[in-house]
């Protein structure tokens, strides 16, 4: 089985010899912690893999999952890998319209949702022809585990090639509709191995895992990091700054989006003493402000290591692990080993160091393309097969990469991506709306906040609050504008294009202070 490129086989091979050691300890709420051993992870994921195997699913079947975070949800991910199917995680904030799109586009054979949402998720899934819908709750209940319990707790990982699909991650599209980034077992494993080396992972590390597990950061970077090191995780179902700080003295590694760091800095319990055992704080998914970087160093004595990546590529660059003082505020560091990174202008001309242009990348971590969107995939790759990230940046003479902006019209709020076109089209479809523009403005907690500017049709009276309320009822909460304005017209340039930069400037102090 040595030539089996199934990611689970590699993760399993990294489990410590003592399978009865604790792999994951939960740290949520008022209840006592739960302790999961490495054997528990192996057996639990085997039972789920065996259940999936018994369903006679077609080759390459997708298993779509929208559940609250739990250790069993991680076992489900591992079970899908083991069984050789394709894991498709979905943000728990998505509502019916969003889920309907993903199910229609990905055509999963299996959907797992929480018992709470089974009514509406089940209905739309069965209507779309999904054969199996299971439930999984964060208290170890639900039909998935009931059914899995009837299966054997040993399983040989399905034989997969490095190039075989392991996961599809939906990332919002510029035209409003999401695209599914197809990641292979080889993409995931090569990146996990590179990060293992780059960040000095060790078996005696203890990772505080406080991120959601439906995106690259929490699911791949954090979980794979710990699993591949045979290192223990302290597992939070949801991020709570005080509870996380209370666990820091027992931990060595923490990963978060910048909002998590900002929220922890607001707590007086965050001190040097609390961080005495920590060896690594990693930030990414959104720009880390230089002031957060400096405040963290001042308060804890630790320098945050910022890295850069995306759903299509997993991790691309990282500040150095050693020496700590080589980590630079405002830079996402150097390309990781195996990653080629270049900057080109919009005509494809390569730029010199220090010049600003589009960031393009190539490497074993770069995805296979967008699910059932060959034209879109072709558009995003250059003739020599570099992926155009849509991020704008520069590379210094010493190789450090700085992201200065985005060519894609994207807002990143608290580490979640929001594409203005999606929100604009929903607003534009509302009665009495002539047009709208959605922009991101600075926000002290979320980094950027979504703001909508709306123009009524002649004679129509619009209520901005009512529009926000209507959006709240239909889309994920993090996409809902934190402020909305009704205006007689949008600023346009001589070409008739909406000048979003003017709107951003006009509202840039909306959430200041
Ligand atoms: C929640 N809200 C948000 C939001 N999260 N609004 C904007 N942006 C967000 N990210 C809404 C809530 O629904 C609520 O609305 C209000 O804002 C306040 O919520 P909260 O209680 O403060 O939010 P909380 O539940 O604490 O969540 C905040 C958070 C969470 C920062 C912990 O957003 C989070 O876990 N973010 C991490 C995202 C992540 O993992 N990204 C990685 C992507 S991978 P209301 O109206 O209900 O009051 C990637 C690649 C890479 O990008 O490089 O890693
Ligand atoms: P996603 O599509 O959710 O995977 O988000 C990926 C995007 O997040 C990237 O294309 C960047 O725009 C952004 N991103 C990730 N890490 C960083 C970082 N450290 N600094 C700035 N932007 C980042």
Image (cartoon, rainbow, N blue to C red):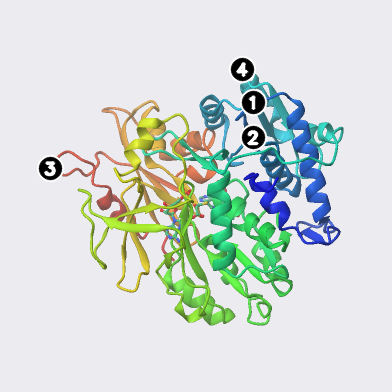
Q: Is mark 4 within 8 Å of ligand 1?
A: no
Check whether the beta carbons of the residues at disc 2 and disc 1 lie within 8 A of each other. yes
Observer-side mark, 1 or 4, equals 1
Task: Identify residue for label 3.
Answer: 494
Residue assigned mark 2:
85
Q: Earlier in the sequence, mark 2 or mark 4?
A: 2
Give the distance between the C-alpha atoms of the residues marked 2 and 4, in whole angstroms.
Answer: 22 Å
Camera-near label (2 vs 4) is 2
Q: Does residue 175 appear anywhere in the picture?
A: no
Q: Which residue is mark 4?
A: 127
Task: Identify the mark at residue 24; answer none if there is no mark.
Answer: none
Residue at the spot 53% in from the left edge and 73% down from the top edge: 321
Foreground label between 3 and 4? 4
The CA distance from mark 3 to mark 4 is 48 Å
In the image, taking residue 1 as reference, residue 433 lies left or right, namely left
Q: How many numbered circles does the render carry?
A: 4
Mark 3 secondary-structure assignment: loop
- On the question of residue 489 being in view, the answer is yes
User: Viewer-proximal residue, 170 or 410?
Assistant: 170
Q: Which mark is residue 109?
A: 1
- Real-space CA distance between mark 1 and mark 4, rounded to the nearest whole angstrom: 13 Å
Q: Position of residue 250 (x, y in %)?
A: 74, 72
Q: Quadrant of residue 49?
A: top right
Residue at screen point 68% across, 34% down: 113
Q: CA distance from mark 2 to mark 3?
A: 52 Å
């Amino acid at each position: 089985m040595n030539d089996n490129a199934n990611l689970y086989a590699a993760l399993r091979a990294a489990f410590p010899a003592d399978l009865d050691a604790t792999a994951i300890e939960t740290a949520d709420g008022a209840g006592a912690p739960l302790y999961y051993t490495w054997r528990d992870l192996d057996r639990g994921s085997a039972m789920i893999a065996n259940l999936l195997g018994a369903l006679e699913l077609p080759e390459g079947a997708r298993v779509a999952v929208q559940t609250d975070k739990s250790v069993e949800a991680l076992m489900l991910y591992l079970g899908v890998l083991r069984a050789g199917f394709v894991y498709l995680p979905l943000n728990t904030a998505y509502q019916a319209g969003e889920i309907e799109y993903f199910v229609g586009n990905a055509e999963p054979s299996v959907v797992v949702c929480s018992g709470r949402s089974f009514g509406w998720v089940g209905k739309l899934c069965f209507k779309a022809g999904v054969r199996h819908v299971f439930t999984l709750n964060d208290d170890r209940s639900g039909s998935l585990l009931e059914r899995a319990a009837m299966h054997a707790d040993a399983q040989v990982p399905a034989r997969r090639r490095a190039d075989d699909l392991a996961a599809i991650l939906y990332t919002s599209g510029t035209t409003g509709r999401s695209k599914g980034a197809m990641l292979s077992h080889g993409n995931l494993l090569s990146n996990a191995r590179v990060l293992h080396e780059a960040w000095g992972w060790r078996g005696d590390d203890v990772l505080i895992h406080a991120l959601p597990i439906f995106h690259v950061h929490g699911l791949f970077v954090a979980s794979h990091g710990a699993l591949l090191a045979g290192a223990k995780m302290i597992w939070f179902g949801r991020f709570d700054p005080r509870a996380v700080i209370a666990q820091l003295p027992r931990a060595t590694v923490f990963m978060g989006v910048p909002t998590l760091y900002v929220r922890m800095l607001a707590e007086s319990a965050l001190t040097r003493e609390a961080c005495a055992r920590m060896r690594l704080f990693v930030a990414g998914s959104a720009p880390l402000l230089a002031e957060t970087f400096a405040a963290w160093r001042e308060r804890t004595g630790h320098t945050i290591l910022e890295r850069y990546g995306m759903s299509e590529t997993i991790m691309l660059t990282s500040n150095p692990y050693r020496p700590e003082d080589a980590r630079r505020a405002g830079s996402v560091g150097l390309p990781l080993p195996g990653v080629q990174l270049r900057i080109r202008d919009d005509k494809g001309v390569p730029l010199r160091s220090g010049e600003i242009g589009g960031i393009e990348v190539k490497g074993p971590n770069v995805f296979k393309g967008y699910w059932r969107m060959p034209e879109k995939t072709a558009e995003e790759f250059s003739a020599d097969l570099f992926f155009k990230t849509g991020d704008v940046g520069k590379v210094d003479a010493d190789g450090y990469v700085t992201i200065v902006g985005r060519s894609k019209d994207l807002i990143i709020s608290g580490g979640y991506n929001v594409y203005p076109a999606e929100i604009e089209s929903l607003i534009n479809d509302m009665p009495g709306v002539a047009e709208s523009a959605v922009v991101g403005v600075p926000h002290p907690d979320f980094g950027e906040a979504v703001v909508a500017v709306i123009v009524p049709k002649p004679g129509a009276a619009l209520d901005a609050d009512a529009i926000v309320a209507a959006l709240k009822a239909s889309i994920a909460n993090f996409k809902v504008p934190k402020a909305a304005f009704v205006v007689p017209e949008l600023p346009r340039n001589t070409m008739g294009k909406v000048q979003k930069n003017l709107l951003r400037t006009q509202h840039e102090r909306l959430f200041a202070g």
